Image: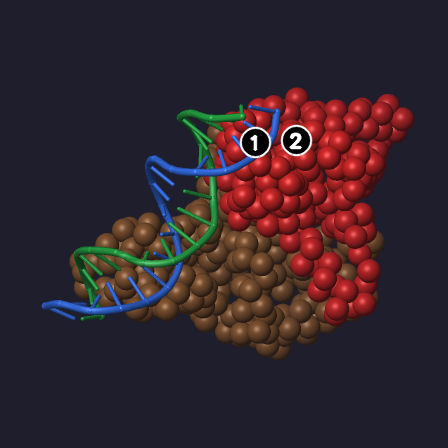
Chain colours: A brown, B red, C blue, D green
DNA sequence: GTCTATATCCCGATAGAC
DNA sequence: GTCTATCGGGATATAGAC
């Protein structure tokens, strides 16, 4: 029964779905509380403001994903100090897919939220992410840098942001793209097969010599 | 003098700048008419609604860019039937930069608007673009297919959508990324230098053998 | 075509009873 | 902790004088 879930969680569950689908500013607190079947005022009681709710939604995913990703990268570097970019990106797949075990559609929701967070809201979510999870981020960047030492740091910066765009945009359109590929090319895909398709693309792009 | 420009143009000029910077839903008609120094009611008189204004802003760019891009691709195919993917993507740069000659910052504004259009607004701008400019789009896809005939059509489909995501996300975040690169790497970038950075990335990704 | 004034609505946030 | 009721404000859109 959904009534067994506490109000705070009900709000988070409804909010993340709506934020991912419609964006932050297009999602009102009234819509969230209506879907969550809780009172409007409970958002401010539990979270203080809409902005804090947005952060809480993101934090619930980042708190799981970031440590798992860091662990996976560290493990890879121990097992294979010569790991390729392809290996590094592939190491993130398992932590990403683990998000599907905690909530249905978790992987896609997370990546969509990440994309919204970087584009909407003038920089404050970007700042939140980099300040709260900066350690994990820079250890990932450093792993990439070790793997392709000839590429200048500034180029790595740009290409990793290109990669972020590739992934989050693809995930935002994943349902439509999977449908089209099924109709036009008789392909059966799901989120994992799409991620597997994107990895060679981004690995080639980050590694390219300009 | 700006007062010599008619009201409709003043609205379009102010709106495109604000839409590109802040996004569509974060930009109110009040803000637009205030910057344009025209009356609030004139937007509805000239465009009917905010949604129609958004389409008019995009159309003003697409009507120039799409034919120019098609011409550039056709010309490239005549001049060099063996054109590489890098050549094909590069052929789009000149039509893009031409937008700077019609309005200051035109290239950047157009690409940011395109990014916002694909990411915000649940599909209705996407539909507007593909239905109004579908002929130009498919001639571009066909040029790519000719350039990399060994890559299965389904893979091209996926990778061109990856590419769309790369470009759209990068352009929507371009201002922030340019700022960060300036602070962290002492790089001075503008939209053209970012475009030049992204072309090798996407060309490598589309061409990669999986 | 351009203006003022306003209708209508939805927003985030909060006061205060329970 | 949860509710009702509401505040104050900003949004799009429009009516109607000029």
Residues at marks 1 and 2 touching, judged by CB atoms closer than 8 Å = yes
Q: Residues within 10 Å of mark 2 (few under 14, many from 20)?
A: some
Q: Residue at x 75, y 24 (%)?
A: B67
Assign a secondary structure to mark 2. helix
Q: Nearer the viewer, residue B30 or A203?
A: B30
Give the quarter of the figure containing the N terminus of chain A.
bottom left
Residue lying furthest right in this view? Answer: B79
Q: Residue at x 36, y 68 (%)?
A: A47
Q: Residue at x 33, y 65 (%)?
A: A44
Residue underneath mark 2: B7
Q: Position of residue A123 (x, y in %)?
A: 59, 62
Q: Which mark is residue B28?
A: none
Q: Residue at x 78, y 27 (%)?
A: B68
Q: Is residue C8 left or right of residue B36?
A: left
Q: Is residue A46 left or right of residue A19?
A: left
Q: Nearer the viewer, residue D11 or A22?
A: D11
Q: State the separation of the CA atoms marked 1 and 2.
A: 8 Å
- Count of marks overlaid on the render: 2
Q: Chain of mark 2?
A: B
Assign a secondary structure to mark 1. helix
Q: Is residue A110 above or below residue B100?
A: below
Q: Nearer the viewer, residue B28 or C7?
A: C7
Q: Is residue A89 above or below residue A108?
A: below
Q: Is residue A19 left or right of residue B42?
A: left
Among numbered discs 1 and 2, the one appearing first in the sequence: 2
Q: Position of residue A200 (x, y in %)?
A: 65, 51
Residue underneath mark 1: B42
Q: Position of residue A165 (x, y in %)?
A: 61, 52
Q: Position of residue C17 (x, y in %)?
A: 13, 67
Q: Quadrant of residue A76?
A: bottom right
Give the quarter of the figure containing the C terminus of chain A.
bottom right
Q: Residues within 10 Å of mark 1 (few under 14, many from 20)?
A: some
């Amino acid at each position: 029964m959904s009534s067994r879930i506490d109000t705070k969680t009900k709000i988070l569950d409804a909010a993340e779905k709506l934020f991912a689908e419609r964006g932050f500013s297009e999602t009102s607190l009234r819509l969230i509380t209506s879907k969550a079947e809780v009172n409007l005022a409970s958002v401010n009681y539990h979270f203080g403001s809409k902005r804090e709710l947005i952060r809480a939604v993101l934090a619930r995913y980042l708190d799981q994903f970031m440590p798992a990703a860091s662990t996976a990268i560290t493990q890879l570097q121990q097992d294979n100090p010569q790991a390729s970019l392809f290996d590094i990106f592939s190491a993130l797949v398992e932590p990403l897919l683990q998000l599907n075990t905690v909530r249905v559609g978790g992987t896609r929701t997370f990546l969509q939220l990440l994309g919204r967070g970087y584009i909407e809201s003038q920089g404050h979510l970007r700042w939140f992410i980099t300040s709260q999870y900066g350690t994990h981020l820079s250890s990932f960047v450093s792993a990439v840098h070790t793997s392709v030492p000839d590429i200048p740091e500034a180029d790595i910066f740009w290409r990793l942001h290109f990669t972020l765009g590739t992934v989050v945009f693809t995930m935002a359109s994943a349902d439509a793209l999977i449908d089209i590929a099924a109709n036009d090319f008789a392909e059966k895909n799901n989120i994992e097969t799409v991620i597997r398709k994107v990895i060679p693309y981004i690995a080639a792009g980050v590694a390219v010599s300009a």
